[in-house]
Image (cartoon, grey):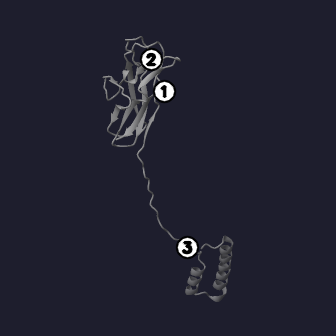
Amino acid sequence: MELPRELVSKVNEYRATWSARLAAGAGMTAVAAGVLAFTGSSVLADTDADSTTANVEVLSSITLTGLTDSFTLTGAPGSIPTTGATPVTMTVTTNNFAGYNVSVVPRTPNLTGAIAGNTDVIPANALQVDGPVQAGTYAPLTHPTPLVVAVKNSASAPAGDAITNNYRIIVPFVRPDTYSGILDYVATTL
């Protein structure tokens, strides 16, 4: 326990006074001076110590971000438009050293028109995708089976891996309209 500063100051003041008196009048011996010096020294604080272990548990994580909001393939029946210069892009980030894959699946079996009363549909499997796995060969989508479009057998770069998918379709013979369907992308650790 540490004594208050004012009390330590008073003790030191009395010690100096008594040291001077003893040295001047009483012929202080070397032993008495040693005892006075020992008993008048600063008071030591009580201490105790212990330790703790710091642990950091890092969990596996994966994120798929920056997915292109939408794309449009435009053409007349029989034409084969592609996304070309404006492909679907995304970023996958994971610290899982076994790696990851990315798959895509149509949410519904058909793309439906926007015009009221149009009953024509475009089958979702008419859409074809070319990703890193397909390596230049377009593969048809199939509802409800996910199609793997990217695979990596290691962790991503710290800032994530950029992934690009190109789409195409052989435009079927349907009414003029904009036919839409949602494609769900999923990134999964291996």
Q: Could you tell me if residue 127 is visible in this image?
A: no
Q: Earlier in the sequence, mark 2 or mark 1?
A: 1
Residue position marked by numbered label 2 in the rendering: 120
Q: In the figure, residue 93 lies in which quadrant? A: top left
Q: CA distance from mark 1 to mark 3?
A: 66 Å
SS label for mark 1:
loop
Residue position marked by numbered label 3 in the rendering: 46
Q: Position of residue 20 (x, y in %)?
A: 66, 81
Q: In the figure, residue 130 lies in which quadrant? A: top left
Which tag is nearer the camera, tag 2 or tag 1?
Answer: 2
Query: Mark 2 near mark 1, Cβ–Cβ under 8 Å?
Result: no
Q: Which mark is residue 69?
A: 1
Q: Position of residue 34 (x, y in %)?
A: 56, 83
SS label for mark 2:
loop
Residue under the image location 48 percent in, 26 percent down: 69
* Foreground residue among 32 and 189: 189
Q: In the figure, residue 111 lies in which quadrant? A: top left
Q: Amino acid at mark 2?
A: Asp
Q: Amino acid at mark 3?
A: Asp
Q: Is residue 129 left or right of residue 53?
A: left
Q: Position of residue 157 (x, y in %)?
A: 39, 37
Establish if 38 lies above or below 190: below
Residue under the image location 64 percent in, 81 percent down: 19
Which tag is nearer the camera, tag 1 or tag 3?
Answer: 1
Which quadrant: the C terminus? top left
The local crowd at label 3, few if under 14, some if 14 to 19, many if 20 or more residues have their Cα within 10 Å, is few
Which quadrant: the N terminus? bottom right
Q: Is residue 153 left or right of residue 69?
A: left
The local crowd at label 2, few if under 14, some if 14 to 19, many if 20 or more residues have their Cα within 10 Å, is some
Q: Amino acid at mark 1?
A: Asp
* Foreground residue among 43 and 137: 137
The local crowd at label 1, few if under 14, some if 14 to 19, many if 20 or more residues have their Cα within 10 Å, is few
